[in-house]
Amino acid sequence: MKIFNNTTIKAIDKATIEIDGVTSLELVERAAEAITCEIISRWRSNKKVSIFAGNGNNGADALAVARLLIEQGYNPEIYLFNIGGNQLSPECKVCRDRLIEMGNANLFEITENFTLPAISPNHLVIDGLFGTGLNRPIAGGFTTLIRYINDSNATILSIDVPSGLLGDWNSNPINRNIIHANLTLAIQFPRLAFLLRDNAELVGEWKVLDIALNADAIRNSPSNYFLVEKSEIRQAIRKRDIFASKADCGSALLIAGSYGMMGAAVLGANAASRSGAGKISVYSPRCGYNIIQSSVPEALFIADKHDIITTDINLSHHYNAIAVGPGIGTHELTIQALEKFLKNTKQPVILDADALNCIALRPALLNYIPSNSIITPHVGEFDRIFGNHKSDEERLKKAIDRAKRYGIIIVLKGRYTAVVRYDEHIYFNTSGNASLATAGSGDTLTGLMAGFMAQGYAPEIASLIAVYIHGIAGELASEEHGIFGVKAGDIANNIGRAIKQIMTT
């Protein structure tokens, strides 16, 4: 699913009006019907409802919702802000007039001073003040209203986006001047702002409502931002040839583990073997021999010359995919080995965990990473490499810049893991839950990614598939163990089930 900016969404609205022969008011009604259905499904008609409508089309949506709620037996109080008078959009004016014609609407149109109404924690507040029409921070009297609504402890539903929040980038926002929604009902498309942790307390739960905008207009409108969905992953995964042998399914090498950290290698190797890769090898110091052979009998073991750390990545075979980092540590000899390896490797590689920590200690290594390689930092690893950042938005912008500069793919891990490509296309993952926040979860992702690269998937595709499957595997593991009880090994053990679910449902 594409994620569009405000300008493109307006163009799609306009194209829908021109191509489908509908009016802007009809689009307002479609949105209102979808929003009203959602409200009715969640709250009964005796719920106290206060609706705050601005003078634009976000306000028109709110007024149309008010009319439909009244028809369904609700009794909302409606506050329409028309400061100075004659400020309403044509659609908002029509929706106001329709409410007046009903004769039983508790409509208060504010043209001058405004006395704050009583709002209790038992209220449902519907926020239709500004929506996506806002292009600058809120100021003046509206900041008082928004702070009052937020402090009321009422349940807040925002239409399209919480008032005060910009749908795309928000530089240095003042959160107390932005609605803190419990539920945001986005019209037709999610917004980039929803996917950044900075805005989680503002957006709350969010849901996209389809109002049937023109499919061709959506398809033909460009975007650099995408939300990855199950159907797209299903199409990307190739079916296994019934005559396939292990030689046809590729070979993956994990350079992982060191004394006291062999668990990372075990987790990565298990995940790679569950991915469908034909052959798995683990390169570790000699201390890992018994651990790998007993814990992952499917994997071959290649010993470094050192007993407890990796000091010389000397490969005698070709591998279809190579992943480096889980548990290798940051000893100076290991950093030197990584530098030598990167300087002599031409094929794309996956760099995770301690490989990233080694790079943080020696930033010049970034210049030696082969083109089209993947690095998979979490927030802490990213900041250690690229400097401290004040927000996820700032971090994402830096990832876009650095992926392009170094010609690599950055998998920036988080709730909506962002796969940032060097062509400036960004894909946000939708699968997974909080069960993935556990030690070793990233090691399983690295192994899974290596497994799909080994099977011949290009790095940009392997990263998308692996991240999505990893999330589904976490969901399946949490069904058995609960959010708190999932271990990384549980995620790895559910990879096969995750792939099956994606392919069959």
Image (cartoon, grey):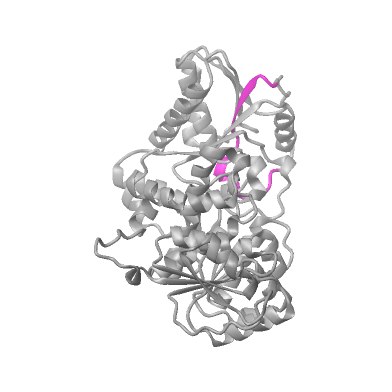
Q: Quadrant of residue 261?
A: bottom right
Q: Nearer the viewer, residue 35 or 447?
A: 447
Q: Is residue 133 magenta?
A: yes
**Which residue is farthest left?**
243
Residue 431 seen? no
Residue 355 quadrant: bottom right
Q: From the viewer's perspective, is 397 left or right of 374?
A: right
In the rendered image, the quadrant that contains the C terminus is: top left
Residue 420 % position (x, y): 53, 64
**Above-or-below relation of 296 to 101:** below
**Which residue is rendered at x = 49% and y = 75% of the image?**
372
- Horizontally, is 260 left or right of 455 in the view? right
Which of 53/305 is in front? 305
244 lies above or below 368: above
Q: Left or right: where does residue 191 sit relative to residue 364?
A: left
Does residue 413 sit above or below 97 in this rendering?
A: below
Q: How many marks?
A: 0
Q: Look at 73% across and 38% down and name the residue there.
A: 143
Image coordinates of residue 340 in percent, x first then y, are 61, 86
- Is 146 within the magenta? no
> Does the rendering let one see residue 240?
yes
Q: What residue is at 63 percent from the left and 35 percent from the top? A: 181
Residue at 63% of width from left, 80% of height from top? 338
Residue 37: x %, y % from top left: 44, 26
| Magenta-tinted stretch | 121-138
Give coordinates of residue 361: x percent, y percent.
73, 75
Q: Nearer the viewer, residue 162 or 100?
A: 162
Q: Is residue 326 left or right of residue 370?
A: right
* Residue placed most toward the observer, 36 or 356: 356
